[in-house]
Image: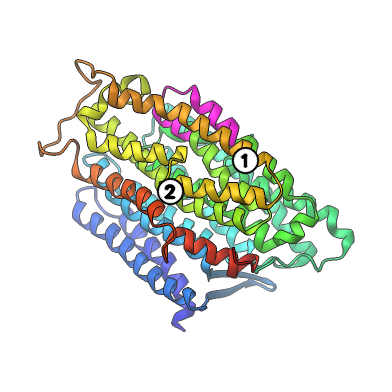
Amino acid sequence: MIDTWLPVGVVLSSFLPGLFIFFLAESRIRLRTALNLIGALAKLALIGVMLWGVLNDHEYVFRHTVLPGLDLVLKADALALLFVTLSAVLWLFTTLYAIGYLEGAPHRSRFFGFFSLCVTATVGVAMAGNLFTFFVFYELLTLATYPLVVHRGTEQAMRAGHVYLGYTLGGGALLLVGTVWLYGLAGQADFVHGGSLAALPPETAGQLQVVFLLLIAGVGVKAALVPLHGWLPLAMVAPAPVSALLHAVAVVKAGAFGIVRIVYEVYGVEFAQSLDLLTPLAIAAAVTIIWGSLRALFQDDLKKRLAYSTVSQVSYIALGVALFGPLGTIGGLVHLVHQGIMKITLFFCAGNYAETLGIHKISEMDGAGRRMPWTSLAFTLGAFGMIGVPPLAGFVSKWYLGLGALEAGMPWVLAVLAASSLLNAAYFLPVLHRIWFRPAPSAWPAEHIPQRGRWETAPLLLLPPLATAAAILLVGLFAASAFSPLDWAKLIADREYLQWTP
């Protein structure tokens, strides 16, 4: 009985505190903080139990019949727990960061209420056991993140929110059409190892190709595949904790995760390959990788440069899925985690520069490393990780993607990875040069001296990026260790999908 309700408990551990927080007065700071942290720690404890169980071949499934032949299913398998664990760990750090970032700001109860609902929807997406459940939580994620994007209430924020809704609701409509069409062809599309569509009559192949296009376009909006990415740079008007959440924990990861589920557990990778669906997906991912990097080169706004970097980097996940081989699968799956750790570090640091020195543009960052050395060290590790410098997290992802390209007989992917790394260097190294080697200005745009003079910024703003920056180094150095993200990605590739042992 408890096995059935553990996935529900993971969802409720953020949903219930979020509901309660909505009704708190702004002055109830300690209670609001306690509810946030209790929910985050309870979620981690429940996930820890399920991680141990799944490692020992146990599966946790909750099923509720909504309509005849249509079930709401939560399933905690190895793939789900890869995404759920990432979301829960980074949610804890983002919560701590947001508490420090929003100190004294208005509407904190509203913010943290929707913040909790956003994480609730994310873990629901991760543990969805069929396409219907995935769609429900996918749309809840859109509704929960919109108030966070428009939180500041400025004209620019409202415009970004409207664009965000337009894109994501449009993507949701495509996903719904694909889901209903597929239901008509095959019934309820459960997420099962190897997919379940290969047994359909051959004459349905054309329809299945169109349905695949609809489903991938639907999730591709949140995954920021070109040309569906236009909402992401505009959404950077949101507060830094929201940007970190969108890029590293929730929205773009939900889209990329949807691509993984559709290819491997709805269609099945071998059946998708037989329908000639994987090569177009690989090309779309490659175009997005290069396009996002090229656009990042020309952004002076720091958060926009990071946003276009996300457009590029998240498509590594889709590229790994499309490589049709275990090594590419491992590279894509491990990048789900590694990109999250690296990108959340960079957005934390961008928030620190903005809140402490008033820096929003790269042209304003000269000498920031001497004023904020620890934040700048964390930013440097995040940037080097994105470039793929060994032994950092990004290097591990790119190494396996490169090996996967060779294994799949797609050497052109190596050129894409090399070009991407060079472009990553081209848009990150000038920033690092400004931070560390250029003289500081006589005055910063809007410097804020923390109350505790020993700290370069508020402690709750500094400690989360230092922790995640350390993780960038550790998951790279100890990638071969048991229980590392790479080890778990290998477990998934072997046990969940391809039944191959790399």
Badge 1: how crowded within 10 Å, few (<14), some, or many (20+)? some
Which secondary structure is most common in the magenta stretch?
A: helix
Q: Residues within 10 Å of mark 2 (few under 14, many from 20)?
A: many
**Amino acid at circle 2:** Ala
Residue with the most extreme right position: 203
The numbered dot on residue 257 is: none
How is colour applied across the structure in the image? rainbow
Q: Is residue 18 above or below residue 319?
A: below
Element under label 1? helix
* Label of residue 414 in the image: 1
Residue 290 percent location from the top left of the image: 59, 32
Note whether 149 is above or below 89 in the view shown. above
Residue 121 rendering spot, x and y as whole percentages: 48, 57
Would residue 102 be visible to someone looking at this image?
Answer: no
Residue drawn at 81 percent across, 69 percent down = 199
Judge from the rendering whether residue 128 lies leftward or rightward of residue 202; answer left or right.
Answer: left
- Give the Cα separation between the discs numbered 1 and 2: 18 Å
- In screen coordinates, is 399 left or right of 413? left
Task: Please say whether residue 13 is one of the residues in the magenta stretch.
Answer: no
Magenta segment boundaries in residue numbering = 289-307
Q: Amino acid at mark 1?
A: Leu
Q: Position of residue 470 (x, y in %)?
A: 31, 49
Q: Which residue is mark 2?
A: 393
